Amino acid sequence: MHRVVFILYPGFELLDMAGPASVFNGANRALGQAGKAPFYQISLASPGGGEVASSTGISVQTARLDELRGQRLGTLLIVGAESGPLQAAMADPELRAALPGLTPEAERFGSVCSGGMVLAGLGLLDGRRVATHWDACAPFQAHFPGVNVDPEALYVTDGRLWTSAGVTTGIDMALAMVARDLDAGIAGEVAQRLVLYARRPGHQSQFSPLLSAQARGDSPFVALIGWIQANLHAPLDVPALADRAGLSERSFHRKFTAATGQTPAHFVETLRLDAARMLLSRGLPLTQVAAQVGLFPAARFSRLFQKRFGISPGTYGEMYRVEA
């Protein structure tokens, strides 16, 4: 069996552990339904062992980290936390003593969310490319200039090292591990079982323009933006959007730009190109993608995609295709 060990400490983010653990358990369930033996064994460990409380107050039982020495380890992941618990973990002498000796023994190792800062503090990430929570990217890079922090990616693989941006992206990373360990079909079954909207590839941006706009709770255009997202194939020029918003074209352009920080045209184009990346990663042909996101003809779509991402849509689809 492939042993997955989550390294915890007081105040850890519960979902950083529970989300990926549910994915691995779901893979075992899918294997069982197919008459096969389980593949993953899930373990929890902490510097002192025993009961460890998460940031939610929910506690879990853990083994001592030093008990892992000499054992066969498949995947070793340290989870993240808010600043206070994270700083305490980085200074924990038992954690600092145990981790450097455990990571070489694991088939792969890494982190979920800000947990990567613990690894970086031990010099285990120097010269490596990593992902972390968008809010931690700047302090991570400032404290550890020898680490290449990718502020965009949901998760990053660099050899044996796997790091994710945080919280729900740990689920995306775990699904990618399942797809690599077993097959994409089982990963798809797990995603469906967990009622996920989509399996997100690691290259997708952490903070989408749609989410950014929705985060502005006082925006008068939240409902309109939701409608745009559901109707990317439709004409979405300023006259059409202004009419739907019940405003004059000039007033709509001014208010929308103030509310979102982008002109309507640029905002719509960004939503369309983000949707196109997802569709391309699912293997849809270029002409179909262009039609679904309203960027037809295909030649126009290709030009815009190349300009925005520096890569052709065809090459992008080949590089980042995720089997359903």
Image (cartoon, grey):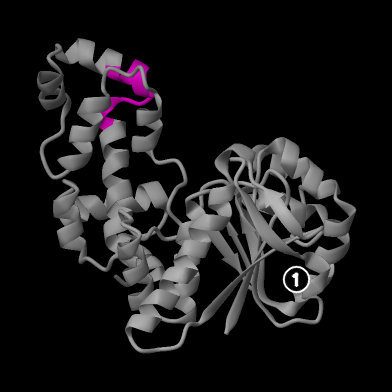
Residue 297 shown left or right of residue 320 in the figure: left
Q: Amino acid at mark 1?
A: Thr
Q: Is residue 219 visible?
A: yes
* Location of residue 306 with respect to 263 vertically, above or below: below
* Location of residue 244 with respect to 266 vertically, above or below: above
Place residue 116 in its image quadrant: bottom right
| Residue drawn at 11 percent across, 40 percent down | 234
| Residue drawn at 11 percent across, 36 percent down | 235
Tell whether position 260 is magenta: yes
Front-most of 256 and 200?
200
Residue 15 shown left or right of residue 258 in the figure: right
Q: Secondary structure at mark 1?
A: helix
Front-most of 251 and 165?
165
User: What percent of the width, then of the height, locates residue 124?
Assistant: 78, 62
Residue 162 shown left or right of residue 24 in the figure: right
Quarter placement of the N terminus: bottom right
Quarter placement of the C terminus: bottom left
Q: Is residue 297 visible?
A: no
| Residue drawn at 38 percent across, 36 percent down | 211
Residue 1 shown left or right of residue 172 in the figure: right
Instruction: Tell me if mark 1 has few (under 14), some (14-19) or many (20+) residues whose alpha carbon lies within 10 angstroms of its own.
Output: many
User: What percent of the width, then of the height, locates residue 38?
Assistant: 47, 83
Front-most of 178 and 249?
178
Give the residue number, with chain letter if any, for mark 1. 103
User: What percent of the width, then of the height, locates residue 138?
Assistant: 66, 38
**Main SS type for the magenta part?**
helix
Per the rendered image, the range of residues in magenta is 256-265
| Residue drawn at 38 percent across, 47 percent down | 308
* Location of residue 212 with respect to 260 vertically, above or below: below
User: What percent of the width, then of the height, locates residue 60?
Assistant: 64, 55
